[in-house]
Image (cartoon, rainbow, N blue to C red):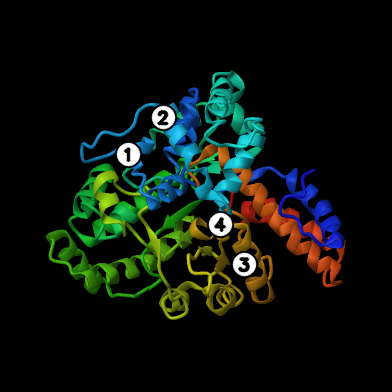
Amino acid sequence: MSDLLLPAEPTQRGIARELYALAAEQPIISPHGHVDPGLIADDAPFPDPARLIIVPDHYVTRMLLSQGIPPAELGVPTRDGTPSEQDGRTIWRRFAEHWHLFRGTPSRLWLERTFETVFGVTERLSPATADAIYDEISARLATPEFRPRALFERFNIEVLATTESPLDDLARHARLADDGWGGPGGRVITTFRPDNVVDMEFEDWAGNVARLGEITGEDTGTYRGYLNALRARRLDFVAAGATSTDHGHLTARTLLLTPAEAEALYTRGLSGTATAEDAEAFRAHMLIEMARMSIEDGLVMQLHPGAFRNHNRWLYDRHGRDVGGDVPHAVEFVHGLKPLLDAHGNDPRLRLVLFTLDEDTFTRELAPLAGGYAALFLGAPWWFLDSPEVMRRFREAVTETAGFYNTAGFVDDTRAFCSIPVRHDVARRIDAGFLARLVAEHRLPLDEAAETIVDLAYRLPKKIFKIGEKL
């Protein structure tokens, strides 16, 4: 067994090996991610290595853009008519030429572990080895053992949650249900992500709201009809297997408006006269409305504020959303969440999982909040923070105040299907090391540490995200 990421100190390393061995055998619960459900529904062979590993991974394309390599040269599709590279081998060679850029980054760790543990590639990537590695991975992708469903089984994934908007027809999830892979209690489930019908500053928000009305048969020309449409759509997602919602707001602000105040904001939004302040107030109010709906229908509520979306405007104009143009910014939780917590924070029917891109808030705000409200749980470090160093700091920062059992386990938050087991493995190794230190310092008995690491790896995410429960 590799000692990767386990403590260097011999006593702690020995304990960590024992704990990691327990975690390593646990099935993967992936309750928050962005894998295309069509990947599993179609079960078609993966494309070439470049389109599997490089093109969809904005961690990779973002780093190369920072060094002057445009995403179009890496095969990222454009929306402005600019041609993008279509030859997989050319993309792969360009990536290998700049492999040194990833030294010390979690991306390099994930990629190298994926090459080795998924594809059996042990040779180090370089311009000299690029073609040989490309050919080796290509040969494996051509075999039945490397089709998506076969890898799903090999990765020991028990449940994989994808993320869809209320405007999605859920047809791919219907196909998965027909095959026995989806629906309530299925192995692939959906997540309700309403940003495009809640955020007035989202591209074509009014058009999206109209489409929501068409799908549900509700009159979204009125605020009441809009709320009814959201409730109806949430129930459609529950029927398709969803156990949670996901909200990606700019801030963590919440605001309790009267029905008349909310109606006035909504009307201004539909008419195109809403200001930026109106949009923020409406987002803040809708978080409380979504909490109310979660109490009604049982969906776990996830909130991950703090991303300045599409900060790189050139990138957005040329390639669209979710291609690496977002940047974290500071978020205030204590005052921002208070209206929601005053209303529902002690209601055991609400389960709210908080994520952050600002690790300064771990100790000061998030751990005390999660340690003080029945409804709150802490999501793992994710996105810009999903590195071994921050994972260690997270446990050090939050455990004293929130303990282990107000945290929600690990989420991989990825579109890169083949990296899922690697990312979970990294988190399990870090937790093994943290618990080993507690045991070595006589702060926790070994048997309790053993129980805790299985909880963190498997039982907690399954429980907190209601995986397998009937809502």
Q: Secondary structure at mark 3?
A: helix
In the rendered view, tell whether residue 48 sits above or below residue 454. Answer: above
The numbered dot on residue 90 is 2
Instruction: Check whether the beta carbons of the residues at disc 4 and disc 1 lie within 8 A of each other.
Output: no
Q: Tag 4: Cα neighbours inside 10 Å, few (<14), some, or many (≥20)?
A: many
N-terminal label among 3 and 2: 2
- Give the structural element (helix, strand or loop) at label 4: loop
Q: Amino acid at mark 2?
A: Thr
**Could you tell whether 401 is left or right of 52 in the image?**
right
Kindly tell me whether residue 68 is visible in this rendering: yes
Number of marks present in the image shown: 4
Q: CA distance from mark 2 to mark 4?
A: 29 Å
- Circles 4 and 3 in contact, beta carbons < 8 Å: no
**Neighbour class for label 1 at 10 Å: few (<14), some, many (≥20)?**
many
Which residue appears at 66% of the width and 56% of the height?
460
Q: Compared to 368, does 22 lie above or below?
A: above
Measured as percent of width and height from the top left, residue 174 is found at 44, 32
Real-space CA distance between mark 4 and mark 3, rounded to the nearest whole angstrom = 10 Å
Bin the neighbour count of mark 2 within 10 Å (Cα to Cα): few under 14, some 14-19, many 20 and up: some
| Residue 220, image x, y percentages | 22, 54
Q: Nearer the viewer, mark 3 or mark 2?
A: 2
Task: Tell me the distance, in whole angstroms, between the alpha carbons under discs 1 and 3.
Answer: 36 Å
Secondary structure under tag 1 reads helix
In this view, the mark in front (2 or 1): 2
Label 3 and label 2: CA atoms lie apart by: 39 Å
Mark 4 and mark 3 lie on one chain; the one further toward the N terminus is: 4
Disc 1 target residue: 72
Quarter of the image where one finds residue 283: bottom left
Labels 3 and 2 touching (C-beta < 8 A): no
